[in-house]
Amino acid sequence: MFRIQVGKKQKQDMTLRSVLLVGGTGFIGSSVAQRLSALGLHVIVPTRRLTKGDALRMLPTIDLVEADIYDTCALCGLMNEVDAVVNLVGVLHSESDAPYGPEFARAHVELPRTLVAAARLSEVPRIVHVSALGADIHGPSEYLRSKADGEAVIRATGPEIAWSIFRPAVVFGPHDKFLNLFATLTAHLPVLPLGGAHTRFQPVFVEDVAAAIVHAVLHRAGLGETIELAGPRIYTLAELVSYVAQLQDHHCMILPLSEKLALLQAAIMECLPGPLMSRDNVRSMRRDCVASTSVAGTTASMPFGIHATALETVAPQWLCDDGDWRGMFNGFRQRAHRRNL
Ligand SMILES: NC(=O)c1ccc[n+]([C@@H]2O[C@H](COP(=O)([O-])OP(=O)(O)OC[C@H]3O[C@@H](n4cnc5c(N)ncnc54)[C@H](OP(=O)(O)O)[C@@H]3O)[C@@H](O)[C@H]2O)c1
């Protein structure tokens, strides 16, 4: 249990007991849930399907509940007695429209609006909202434009709710859908046609993102701020994919695609169930996905004194073919013309 300060007006300590973690069954949400639970906090995790949160159910202070989070009344029921709300809901694909399609509108804009309305009605004093690096109403993709409008909803919150917005770069971790996807593709394809091959990314470790979110909730840090979360190094997408293939000792040739061909490839993928890539994802890669503070490729961007974890120090633990952590040295070994471990 933690003593925190609430609202300038109240000027009294409040005990943080309970957090509503929306999107808590997801990749980042699971790490946040585990950290909050380890601190002894009561965590309510709404989900569309209870089976989705099987891993969380085992944790002692977590209440997994099936709920419609787009329903204000249902949310108010969940927010009863809650001291803070964290929103981690996000989608990568939507039907297309201008300025963005309906699924993006619902998950990225309508949901924050409903959360704010319910938080006001339930007198919840704190919202931590997770957006994305590069969110911009004039951004090149529907994803980035809808994320920007979601942020605007949070910023328009009245003074009674203290808000913070996080903008993570692409996030890596044992259960990510980024490096793991490329690991699968490079394992099975001798040649990988790659859109956005030259786009630069600054991947951030899932545990660092979770640490920042939990710190903001516990210590009411970053109030009224929009905070970027990015790792210590910048890579092109082609570099990241090569690194993953190299860790697994797979020989896969990367074939950079022009945007026209990448859009064609994505249009074909969109016809498959659970598409790996959409044309909107390709358009997102028109811009580098790096922190605004980063220069010359080596600036970590983490708040609250959190040390950004380097990809090379952890990714071999789950990406090396045989789980042999010594694979983290394969890059050095190859440069020295020695065989991989
Ligand atoms: N992962 C990254 O690399 C990355 C990078 C930048 C920003 N972000 C942002 O960080 C947040 C969390 O990302 P994540 O990777 O952890 O996402 P995730 O694994 O896809 O999880 C998102 C959660 O939101 C819920 N959800 C998804 N679609 C929904 C919908 N249409 N309606 C209601 N609930 C829905 C799901 O919960 P249920 O299925 O249990 O209902 C899911 O567990 C998102 O806002 C994302 O945009 C992620």
Image (cartoon, rainbow, N blue to C red):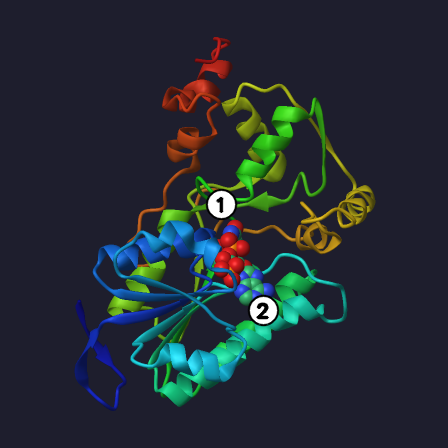
Query: How far apart, in angstroms, are the residues tagged by discs 1 and 2?
Result: 23 Å
Residue corresponding to mark 2: 107
Residue 111 percent coordinates (x, y) = 54, 74
Judge left or right: residue 337 versus residue 3.
right
| Quarter occupied by the N terminus | bottom left
Judge left or right: residue 234 versus residue 77.
right
Residue corresponding to mark 1: 203
From the viewer's perspective, is residue 187 above or below residue 93? above
Sequence order check: which comes first, mark 1 or mark 2?
2
Taking the spot 47% from the left edge, 54% from the top edge, the residue there is 51
Q: Amino acid at mark 2?
A: Ala
Q: Amino acid at mark 1?
A: Pro
Q: Is mark 2 within 8 Å of ligand 1?
A: yes
Q: Is residue 160 visible?
A: yes
From the viewer's perspective, is residue 116 above or below residue 258? below
Residue 47 percent coordinates (x, y) = 47, 64
**Label 1 SS:** loop
| Quarter occupied by the C terminus | top left
**Label 2 SS:** helix
**Local crowd size for mark 1, using a 10 Å CA cut-off: few (<14), some (14–19), many (≥20):** many
Residue closer to the observer: 32 or 296: 32
Q: How many marks?
A: 2
From the viewer's perspective, is residue 127 above or below residue 257? below
Q: Is mark 1 within 8 Å of ligand 1?
A: no
**Local crowd size for mark 2, using a 10 Å CA cut-off: few (<14), some (14–19), many (≥20):** many
Between marks 1 and 2 in the image, the one whose residue lies nearer the viewer: 2
